[in-house]
Amino acid sequence: MSAPVLAGRGLTKDYGALRVLDGVDFEVGPAAAVGIVGPNGAGKTTLLGILAGSVTPSAGRVFIDGDDVTGLRTELRCRRGVGRAFQVPRPFGGMTVLENVLVGAAYGAGLSRSRLYARCVEVLELCGLVDVANRRAESLGLMHRKRLELARSLATGPRVLLLDEIGGGLTDAEAEDLVITVKQLIALGIGVVWIEHIVHILLKVVDRLVCMDAGRVIADGVPAEVLRNAVVIDAYLGRGAT
Ligand SMILES: Nc1ncnc2c1ncn2[C@@H]1O[C@H](COP(=O)(O)OP(=O)(O)OP(=O)(O)O)[C@@H](O)[C@H]1O
């Protein structure tokens, strides 16, 4: 396996007396495709937040390329190759799709003016947004807003992309299309960590599946084996997820 781009060791998060993440180890390398599943409140989003730098861990360390970045702000982690897309898209509403992508490329990736345009076109093509490039972000339907969320993080030039339920609310056909796009990103060498409740969609992309429950990793491995694991069935699948 290649050296991890992004890793966390002993990640723990307490909110007062409530421990929501409990000594989690996690790592992801280039072109890896890792899915994270688990019941509501398992700590999945908290783990992503700590890796991205938006949540400060109570204990544990985060590393990028082996360097300790635990104290590094989100935007500086982004410059070092960690991108994130949110469940609820957060575009700049007053701007067009192209302008939103430009912001990611200019500030997140720190590209020079001469490379900006080429980067934006590449990202719009990859994310299927060329036809709506000049539309204002707030006028987009859900699928295009989800795609724009992906494009904005892609524009920052990530080596690892953290995706938090970006399939939520899409139709099956739209989610299948999103799968094709995410697979293209992985083929380009980007490592993807994808939290998703729509397990059958996730399984079309990931080659490793992590299941969390009550702040801990309860299974981590080949998806088919994780899904057969009795502890996973009891904690998650038995509760009706598919
Ligand atoms: N800022 C906060 N203050 C207090 N508790 C919080 C805070 N953020 C998250 N939590 C709690 O931490 C626990 C884990 O939340 P988290 O969002 O990481 O879970 P999750 O596995 O992503 O859940 P879901 O699948 O519902 O998104 C939950 O019990 C949640 O209520």
Image: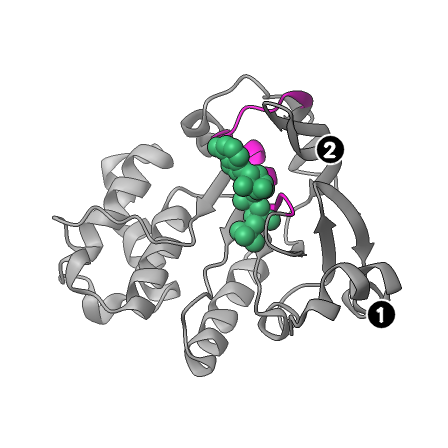
In the image, 97 versus 36, the foreground residue is 36
| Label 1 SS | helix
Residues rendered magenta in the picture: 42-60
Residue at point 13%, 58% (across, down): 136
- Residue 126 place in picture, x, y as percent: 39, 64
Residue 202, position as x, y percentages in the image: 61, 67
The residue nearer to you, when weighing 73 against 18, is: 18
Residue topped by disc 2: 22
Query: Mark 1 or mark 2: which comes first in sequence?
Result: 2
The yes-or-no answer for disc 2 within 8 Å of ligand 1 is: no
Q: Quadrant of the C terminus?
A: bottom right
Instruction: Relative to 188, say whether 48 is above or below.
Output: above
Residue type, mark 1 in image? Arg
Q: Residue at x 73, y 58 (%)?
A: 209
Residue 20 screen position, x and y as percent: 64, 36
Q: Tell me the quarter of the picture where residue 160 sits.
A: top right
Residue type, numbered disc 2: Asp
Quadrant observed for ligand 1 in the rendered image: top right
The response on whether ligand 1 sits within 8 Å of label 1 is no
Tell me if residue 80 is in the magenta stretch. no
The answer to whether any part of residue 80 appears in the image is no
Q: Which residue is mark 1?
A: 228
Relative depth, front residue between 82 and 211: 211
List the single residue furthest toward the top: 71
